[in-house]
Amino acid sequence: MAQAKKAWHDGMMQEYAQGLIHEIAELEELVKANDADAQFRLGQVYRKGRFVEQDFTRAFELIFDAAQQEHVRAEHLLGMMLIRGEGCEKDEDTGCNFVLMAAEDGYPPAQFAMGKLYMTGLHPAGEDKLSGAYWLKRAAADHVPAQLMLGELLLKGEGVKRNETLAAQYFMLAARKGSVEAQEIVGQLFRTGTGVPQDQALARGWLQKAADQGNEEACLTLASMYRNGEGSPRDPVAALKCFQQAAENGNPEAANELGVMYLAGEGTFPDESASAYWFQRAMELEEERLADLKYGAS
Protein backbone atom coordinates (compact mmCIF):
# COMPACT_ATOMS: atom_id res chain seq x y z
CA MET A 1 0.00 0.00 0.00
CA ALA A 2 2.78 2.42 0.96
CA GLN A 3 4.70 1.61 -2.24
CA ALA A 4 1.58 2.19 -4.33
CA LYS A 5 1.00 5.59 -2.69
CA LYS A 6 4.66 6.55 -3.25
CA ALA A 7 4.47 5.49 -6.89
CA TRP A 8 1.30 7.55 -7.34
CA HIS A 9 2.90 10.57 -5.65
CA ASP A 10 6.08 10.27 -7.74
CA GLY A 11 3.99 9.99 -10.89
CA MET A 12 2.00 13.10 -10.01
CA MET A 13 5.18 15.07 -9.26
CA GLN A 14 6.74 13.98 -12.55
CA GLU A 15 3.59 15.01 -14.42
CA TYR A 16 3.61 18.36 -12.60
CA ALA A 17 7.29 18.94 -13.45
CA GLN A 18 6.72 18.07 -17.11
CA GLY A 19 3.79 20.49 -17.21
CA LEU A 20 5.94 23.30 -15.81
CA ILE A 21 8.79 22.60 -18.22
CA HIS A 22 6.31 22.71 -21.11
CA GLU A 23 4.87 25.97 -19.74
CA ILE A 24 8.35 27.52 -19.51
CA ALA A 25 9.03 26.60 -23.14
CA GLU A 26 5.75 28.26 -24.16
CA LEU A 27 6.64 31.38 -22.17
CA GLU A 28 10.03 31.57 -23.89
CA GLU A 29 8.25 31.62 -27.27
CA LEU A 30 5.80 34.29 -26.14
CA VAL A 31 8.68 36.42 -24.81
CA LYS A 32 10.18 36.42 -28.31
CA ALA A 33 6.92 38.01 -29.45
CA ASN A 34 7.33 40.70 -26.75
CA ASP A 35 4.33 39.49 -24.71
CA ALA A 36 4.36 41.53 -21.47
CA ASP A 37 2.56 38.96 -19.31
CA ALA A 38 4.90 36.20 -20.52
CA GLN A 39 7.90 38.41 -19.73
CA PHE A 40 6.62 38.96 -16.21
CA ARG A 41 5.78 35.28 -15.61
CA LEU A 42 9.08 34.03 -17.02
CA GLY A 43 10.90 36.65 -14.95
CA GLN A 44 9.27 35.16 -11.87
CA VAL A 45 10.38 31.68 -12.97
CA TYR A 46 14.03 32.79 -13.16
CA ARG A 47 13.72 34.83 -9.97
CA LYS A 48 12.47 31.85 -7.99
CA GLY A 49 14.53 29.19 -9.80
CA ARG A 50 11.52 27.05 -10.70
CA PHE A 51 12.87 24.22 -12.91
CA VAL A 52 15.54 26.59 -14.25
CA GLU A 53 18.77 27.77 -12.69
CA GLN A 54 17.98 30.79 -10.51
CA ASP A 55 19.13 33.92 -12.34
CA PHE A 56 18.26 37.29 -10.81
CA THR A 57 19.87 39.23 -13.66
CA ARG A 58 17.76 37.46 -16.29
CA ALA A 59 14.71 37.89 -14.06
CA PHE A 60 15.35 41.62 -13.78
CA GLU A 61 15.73 41.99 -17.56
CA LEU A 62 12.45 40.20 -18.26
CA ILE A 63 10.50 42.07 -15.59
CA PHE A 64 12.00 45.37 -16.82
CA ASP A 65 10.78 44.60 -20.35
CA ALA A 66 7.28 43.87 -19.02
CA ALA A 67 7.26 47.06 -16.94
CA GLN A 68 8.20 49.08 -20.02
CA GLN A 69 4.88 47.91 -21.47
CA GLU A 70 3.02 49.20 -18.38
CA HIS A 71 2.42 45.74 -16.92
CA VAL A 72 1.29 46.83 -13.45
CA ARG A 73 2.55 43.79 -11.50
CA ALA A 74 5.90 44.09 -13.29
CA GLU A 75 6.13 47.79 -12.41
CA HIS A 76 5.62 46.95 -8.74
CA LEU A 77 8.07 44.05 -8.68
CA LEU A 78 10.68 45.94 -10.72
CA GLY A 79 10.48 48.79 -8.24
CA MET A 80 11.02 46.47 -5.28
CA MET A 81 13.95 44.75 -7.05
CA LEU A 82 15.58 48.14 -7.70
CA ILE A 83 15.04 49.19 -4.08
CA ARG A 84 16.68 45.95 -2.87
CA GLY A 85 19.32 45.75 -5.60
CA GLU A 86 18.04 42.34 -6.67
CA GLY A 87 19.56 41.41 -10.05
CA CYS A 88 20.62 45.02 -10.61
CA GLU A 89 22.41 48.00 -9.10
CA LYS A 90 20.50 49.31 -6.10
CA ASP A 91 18.54 52.42 -7.08
CA GLU A 92 15.95 53.47 -4.50
CA ASP A 93 14.79 56.59 -6.33
CA THR A 94 14.02 54.80 -9.59
CA GLY A 95 12.60 51.85 -7.68
CA CYS A 96 10.15 54.05 -5.78
CA ASN A 97 9.09 55.68 -9.04
CA PHE A 98 8.17 52.29 -10.53
CA VAL A 99 6.27 51.29 -7.39
CA LEU A 100 4.48 54.64 -7.57
CA MET A 101 3.47 53.96 -11.19
CA ALA A 102 1.84 50.68 -10.16
CA ALA A 103 0.23 52.31 -7.13
CA GLU A 104 -1.25 55.11 -9.24
CA ASP A 105 -2.58 52.45 -11.63
CA GLY A 106 -4.60 51.08 -8.69
CA TYR A 107 -2.54 47.97 -7.82
CA PRO A 108 -3.17 47.35 -4.06
CA PRO A 109 0.17 45.60 -3.27
CA ALA A 110 2.02 48.59 -4.76
CA GLN A 111 -0.17 51.02 -2.81
CA PHE A 112 0.62 49.06 0.35
CA ALA A 113 4.34 49.14 -0.50
CA MET A 114 4.20 52.92 -0.91
CA GLY A 115 2.44 53.23 2.43
CA LYS A 116 5.08 51.14 4.17
CA LEU A 117 7.96 52.99 2.52
CA TYR A 118 6.63 56.34 3.74
CA MET A 119 5.59 55.09 7.19
CA THR A 120 8.93 53.43 7.94
CA GLY A 121 11.09 56.19 6.49
CA LEU A 122 12.57 53.87 3.85
CA HIS A 123 11.34 56.12 1.05
CA PRO A 124 14.19 58.28 -0.35
CA ALA A 125 12.14 61.36 0.62
CA GLY A 126 12.19 60.17 4.23
CA GLU A 127 9.41 59.48 6.68
CA ASP A 128 6.06 60.96 5.70
CA LYS A 129 3.18 59.65 7.83
CA LEU A 130 0.56 61.64 5.94
CA SER A 131 1.56 60.19 2.56
CA GLY A 132 1.93 56.75 4.12
CA ALA A 133 -1.59 56.86 5.54
CA TYR A 134 -2.94 58.04 2.17
CA TRP A 135 -1.52 55.04 0.32
CA LEU A 136 -2.48 52.57 3.04
CA LYS A 137 -6.08 53.81 2.91
CA ARG A 138 -6.16 53.33 -0.86
CA ALA A 139 -4.74 49.81 -0.56
CA ALA A 140 -6.97 48.86 2.38
CA ALA A 141 -10.09 48.73 0.21
CA ASP A 142 -9.05 45.23 -0.88
CA HIS A 143 -5.67 44.28 0.61
CA VAL A 144 -5.39 42.37 3.88
CA PRO A 145 -1.84 43.47 4.90
CA ALA A 146 -2.87 47.11 4.39
CA GLN A 147 -6.03 46.57 6.44
CA LEU A 148 -3.94 45.11 9.26
CA MET A 149 -1.32 47.85 9.21
CA LEU A 150 -3.88 50.65 9.01
CA GLY A 151 -5.88 49.07 11.82
CA GLU A 152 -2.79 48.99 14.03
CA LEU A 153 -1.91 52.62 13.24
CA LEU A 154 -5.47 53.80 13.96
CA LEU A 155 -5.57 51.80 17.19
CA LYS A 156 -2.33 53.38 18.43
CA GLY A 157 -2.73 56.80 16.82
CA GLU A 158 0.59 56.48 14.96
CA GLY A 159 0.76 58.77 11.93
CA VAL A 160 -3.02 59.10 11.94
CA LYS A 161 -5.59 60.38 14.41
CA ARG A 162 -6.48 57.63 16.87
CA ASN A 163 -9.82 56.05 15.97
CA GLU A 164 -10.62 52.74 17.66
CA THR A 165 -13.94 52.34 15.84
CA LEU A 166 -12.35 52.72 12.40
CA ALA A 167 -9.46 50.47 13.45
CA ALA A 168 -11.94 47.75 14.39
CA GLN A 169 -13.62 48.08 10.99
CA TYR A 170 -10.33 47.51 9.16
CA PHE A 171 -9.45 44.54 11.37
CA MET A 172 -12.92 43.11 10.71
CA LEU A 173 -12.40 43.40 6.95
CA ALA A 174 -9.15 41.43 7.23
CA ALA A 175 -10.68 38.88 9.60
CA ARG A 176 -13.55 38.19 7.22
CA LYS A 177 -11.03 37.64 4.43
CA GLY A 178 -9.47 34.87 6.53
CA SER A 179 -6.52 36.61 8.21
CA VAL A 180 -5.75 34.59 11.35
CA GLU A 181 -3.90 37.54 12.90
CA ALA A 182 -6.93 39.77 12.33
CA GLN A 183 -9.32 37.16 13.73
CA GLU A 184 -7.32 37.06 16.96
CA ILE A 185 -7.26 40.87 17.16
CA VAL A 186 -11.02 41.14 16.51
CA GLY A 187 -11.60 38.61 19.28
CA GLN A 188 -9.55 40.73 21.67
CA LEU A 189 -11.44 43.88 20.63
CA PHE A 190 -14.82 42.29 21.36
CA ARG A 191 -13.45 40.95 24.65
CA THR A 192 -12.43 44.40 25.86
CA GLY A 193 -15.04 46.46 24.02
CA THR A 194 -12.39 48.40 22.10
CA GLY A 195 -13.91 50.08 19.05
CA VAL A 196 -16.89 47.70 19.21
CA PRO A 197 -19.56 46.91 21.81
CA GLN A 198 -18.18 44.43 24.35
CA ASP A 199 -19.47 40.95 23.49
CA GLN A 200 -17.85 37.90 25.09
CA ALA A 201 -19.70 35.44 22.84
CA LEU A 202 -18.41 37.14 19.69
CA ALA A 203 -14.98 37.38 21.30
CA ARG A 204 -14.88 33.63 21.87
CA GLY A 205 -16.14 32.96 18.34
CA TRP A 206 -13.38 34.98 16.66
CA LEU A 207 -10.70 33.75 19.04
CA GLN A 208 -11.77 30.17 18.37
CA LYS A 209 -11.42 30.73 14.61
CA ALA A 210 -7.86 31.94 15.14
CA ALA A 211 -7.04 29.22 17.69
CA ASP A 212 -8.25 26.51 15.32
CA GLN A 213 -5.61 27.73 12.86
CA GLY A 214 -2.80 27.59 15.42
CA ASN A 215 -2.74 31.15 16.77
CA GLU A 216 -1.10 30.87 20.21
CA GLU A 217 -2.36 34.18 21.60
CA ALA A 218 -5.92 33.20 20.75
CA CYS A 219 -5.47 29.85 22.51
CA LEU A 220 -4.08 31.53 25.63
CA THR A 221 -6.85 34.14 25.75
CA LEU A 222 -9.55 31.51 25.27
CA ALA A 223 -8.02 29.41 28.03
CA SER A 224 -8.07 32.39 30.37
CA MET A 225 -11.69 33.20 29.49
CA TYR A 226 -12.86 29.64 30.12
CA ARG A 227 -10.81 29.36 33.29
CA ASN A 228 -12.07 32.63 34.79
CA GLY A 229 -15.63 32.37 33.51
CA GLU A 230 -15.54 35.48 31.33
CA GLY A 231 -18.99 35.86 29.75
CA SER A 232 -20.00 32.31 30.63
CA PRO A 233 -19.72 29.85 33.55
CA ARG A 234 -16.20 28.65 34.33
CA ASP A 235 -15.12 25.70 32.20
CA PRO A 236 -11.76 24.35 33.39
CA VAL A 237 -11.98 21.38 31.00
CA ALA A 238 -12.19 23.72 27.99
CA ALA A 239 -9.40 25.86 29.50
CA LEU A 240 -7.17 22.80 29.84
CA LYS A 241 -7.83 21.89 26.21
CA CYS A 242 -6.88 25.40 25.02
CA PHE A 243 -3.68 25.43 27.09
CA GLN A 244 -2.83 21.99 25.70
CA GLN A 245 -3.25 23.26 22.13
CA ALA A 246 -0.96 26.23 22.74
CA ALA A 247 1.61 24.13 24.62
CA GLU A 248 1.76 21.59 21.81
CA ASN A 249 2.47 24.50 19.46
CA GLY A 250 5.49 25.36 21.62
CA ASN A 251 4.19 28.03 24.01
CA PRO A 252 6.04 27.92 27.37
CA GLU A 253 3.38 29.90 29.30
CA ALA A 254 0.71 27.41 28.26
CA ALA A 255 2.92 24.48 29.23
CA ASN A 256 3.49 26.01 32.67
CA GLU A 257 -0.27 26.53 33.18
CA LEU A 258 -0.84 22.88 32.26
CA GLY A 259 1.61 21.93 34.99
CA VAL A 260 -0.37 24.02 37.49
CA MET A 261 -3.72 22.57 36.40
CA TYR A 262 -2.57 18.94 36.48
CA LEU A 263 -1.04 19.47 39.91
CA ALA A 264 -4.25 21.01 41.29
CA GLY A 265 -6.60 18.68 39.43
CA GLU A 266 -8.20 21.63 37.67
CA GLY A 267 -10.21 20.46 34.68
CA THR A 268 -8.78 16.98 35.12
CA PHE A 269 -7.85 14.45 37.79
CA PRO A 270 -4.74 15.39 39.79
CA ASP A 271 -1.72 13.90 38.02
CA GLU A 272 1.71 14.66 39.47
CA SER A 273 3.48 12.85 36.63
CA ALA A 274 1.72 14.92 33.97
CA SER A 275 2.31 18.05 36.03
CA ALA A 276 6.04 17.37 36.27
CA TYR A 277 6.19 16.68 32.53
CA TRP A 278 4.57 20.01 31.63
CA PHE A 279 6.67 22.02 34.11
CA GLN A 280 9.78 20.46 32.55
CA ARG A 281 8.45 21.09 29.06
CA ALA A 282 7.78 24.74 29.95
CA MET A 283 11.44 25.19 30.97
CA GLU A 284 12.65 23.55 27.76
CA LEU A 285 10.42 25.72 25.60
CA GLU A 286 11.54 28.87 27.42
CA GLU A 287 15.18 27.91 26.88
CA GLU A 288 14.45 27.39 23.17
CA ARG A 289 12.77 30.79 22.98
CA LEU A 290 15.73 32.52 24.66
CA ALA A 291 18.16 30.74 22.34
CA ASP A 292 16.14 31.88 19.32
CA LEU A 293 16.22 35.46 20.61
CA LYS A 294 19.96 35.29 21.27
CA TYR A 295 20.95 33.84 17.90
CA GLY A 296 18.32 35.84 16.04
CA ALA A 297 19.82 39.05 17.39
CA SER A 298 23.41 38.09 16.60
Image (cartoon, grey):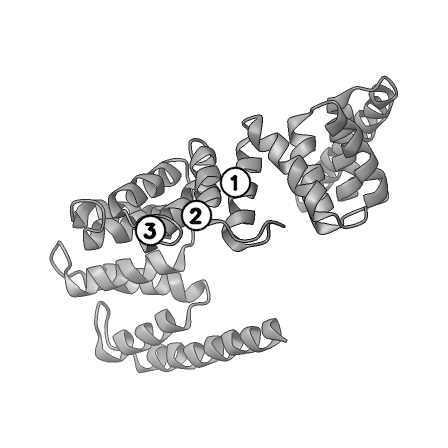
| Residue 149, label in figure | 2
Q: Is residue 148 above or below residue 192?
A: above
Q: Is residue 229 above or below residue 125?
A: below
Left or right of residue 57, residue 228 in this image? left
C-alpha distance separating marks 2 and 3: 12 Å
Tags 2 and 3 touching, CB below 8 Å: no
Q: Residue at x 18, y 51 (%)?
A: 193
Q: Position of residue 282 (x, y in %)?
A: 42, 77
**Disc 1 on helix, strand or loop?**
helix
Q: Is residue 250 above or below residue 277?
A: above
| Residue 209, label in figure | none
User: Which three-letter amino acid code belongs to the residue tagged 3?
Assistant: Ile
Nearer to us: label 2 or label 3: 2
Disc 1 crowd rating (10 Å Cα; few below 14, some 14-19, many 20+) is: many
Left or right of residue 130, residue 4 in this image? right
Q: Which residue is mark 1?
A: 112
Q: Quadrant of the C terminus?
A: bottom right
Q: Which residue is mark 3?
A: 185
User: Which three-letter amino acid code belongs to the residue tagged 1?
Assistant: Phe
Residue 297 in view, yes or no: yes
In which quadrant of the rendered view does residue 36 lie?
Answer: top right
In which quadrant of the rendered view does residue 260 lie?
Answer: bottom left
Q: Quadrant of the N terminus?
A: top right
